[in-house]
Amino acid sequence: MTEDRGIPPDAAAAAAAQAWFDRHAGPLVRPYTITGGRTRPRGDDLALITLVVARDPRQVTVRMRPEPAAILELCREQPLAVAEIAGRLDLPISVVKVLLGDLIEDALILTRAPVAVDAPDVRIIQRVIEGVRRL
């Protein structure tokens, strides 16, 4: 079809590839294509500081889609926060949460929610500050 317009097939393929690449932004892939059109994770409600680690550091990722494989690669050796994963992969938080939900459902990652800690009484902190000032 492209030969009818006088464009060699190789040039048409190169032009098509160029249309999906921005010199400054990199490959142009819409977030909904990465998540299969989903906007919310299937399961767990993940906070930005929830820690994520690969369940099995030896998990083979060759046959996985690139983004979930990249998450597993990042989380093989040490736990990372959801926000840190999004930052390292340069993906929106919402996309990362959907992908993490899939990995949780497939039992490929473990998560640890942030621990809720009661804030200390402000009066105690003020007494400590006053005590330090007297020193």
Image (spheres, rainbow, N blue to C red):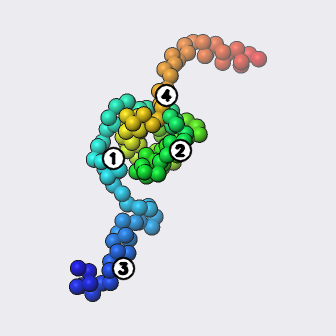
Secondary structure at badge 4 equals strand
Q: Are marks 3 and 1 in contact (CB under 8 Å)?
A: no
Mark toward the start of the polypeptide (4 vs 2):
2
Q: Assign the N terminus to one quadrant of the image.
A: bottom left
Residue at 41% across, 38% down: 103
Q: Which residue is mark 2?
A: 74
Residue tagged by mark 3? 10
First in sequence: mark 1 vs mark 4: 1
What's the amino acid at mark 2? Leu
User: Mark 3, mark 4: which one is toward the viewer?
Assistant: 3
Location of mark 1 (residue): 35
Please say if the residues under marks 1 and 2 sit with CB atoms less than 8 Å apart: no
- Mark 4–mark 2 CB contact (< 8 Å): no
x, y (%) of residue 81? Answer: 51, 36
The alpha-carbon separation of the residues under discs 1 and 4 comes to 23 Å
In the drawing, what numbered circle is on residue 112?
A: 4
Q: Give the amino acid type for the residue marked by disc 4 in the picture.
A: Arg
User: Does residue 90 appear in this view?
Assistant: no
- How far apart in space, not on screen, are marks 4 and 2 (Cα)? 16 Å
Q: Nearer the viewer, residue 16 or 84?
A: 16
